[in-house]
Image: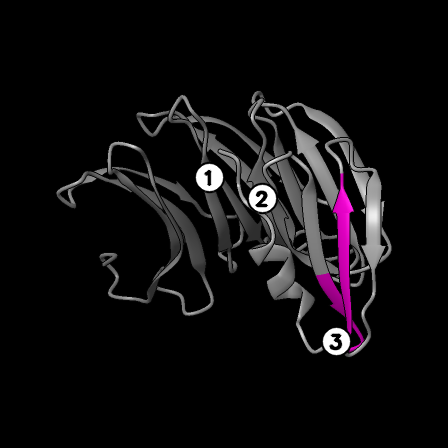
Amino acid sequence: NNPNNKEDRAVDLLVDNSGNGFVVGNNASYLSYDANVTVNKFSTSGLLQWEGFFDSPGNQMDNAVRVIKDGSHAVYTLSTVNNNVSKADVLITKYNSKGVLLWQINYDTAAVDNGAYAMEMDAQKNIYVLFGASGGWDTKLMKYDSLGTLIWDRYYADPFYVMNMDNTGQLVLGGGRSGYYDNLCQRVDQNGNTLSYSTPVNAAVNVFARAISSATDPI
């Protein structure tokens, strides 16, 4: 509970091999329209070990999306953040095992909203970030190394909202057009190249669920 007695909301959770829990979410300030991104580490007995915090300039809404970790206990978070200068931006942060912020990346195209959707990590500790490129009608996929250096970015004309990595390291993207009546499923390799693409119109099985349930995280 934050000291302002405003809304606190958990968005994503992971547990490491030692049983420690990492929770990413939002808490509100005194202002009803201001929400901040938090990431908290809890011990196996539920004691708070450390807290990371982000509040964008201008006291606007910041929304956490995802938390993942690597084998060295570093923690990465993905969020959509807002300010008074530009449209919504994508924020990626990395913390070490003690909760010290190592780096953060703010992806901002200024003219359009960029909404963060998903993040995955491969066996080499590269991260893949999926987000809306033009207000959610198309998609960008970006690959960064563990130092936060951009390796490549790919643009897809279709709106993809979910992503998972299978045990071969390939990424499965799921999305939908026209109010989700046209489902989309796309498989890409670790260079962002399309391996397969399907559009089962009005399919009985939603591709969102298929994309997630058919893929297994190798980490």
Tell me whether circle 1 and circle 2 mark residues in contact (CB < 8 Å). Answer: yes
* Mark 1 Cα shell of 10 Å, populated few (<14), some (14-19), many (≥20): many
Q: Earlier in the sequence, mark 1 or mark 3?
A: 1
Q: Which residue is mark 2?
A: 119
Residue 193 part of the magenta segment = no
70 horizontally vs 2: left or right: right
> Residue 134, position in %: x, y?
79, 57
Q: Which residues are magenta?
A: 175-188
Number of callouts? 3
Q: Which residue is mark 1?
A: 68
Q: Residue at x 62, y 52 (%)?
A: 116
Q: Earlier in the sequence, mark 2 or mark 3?
A: 2
Q: Residue at x 32, y 36 (%)?
A: 16
> In the rendered image, which quarter contains the N terminus?
bottom left
> Residue 202, position in %: x, y?
77, 79
Of 112 and 125, the residue lying toward us: 125
Residue 177 part of the magenta segment = yes
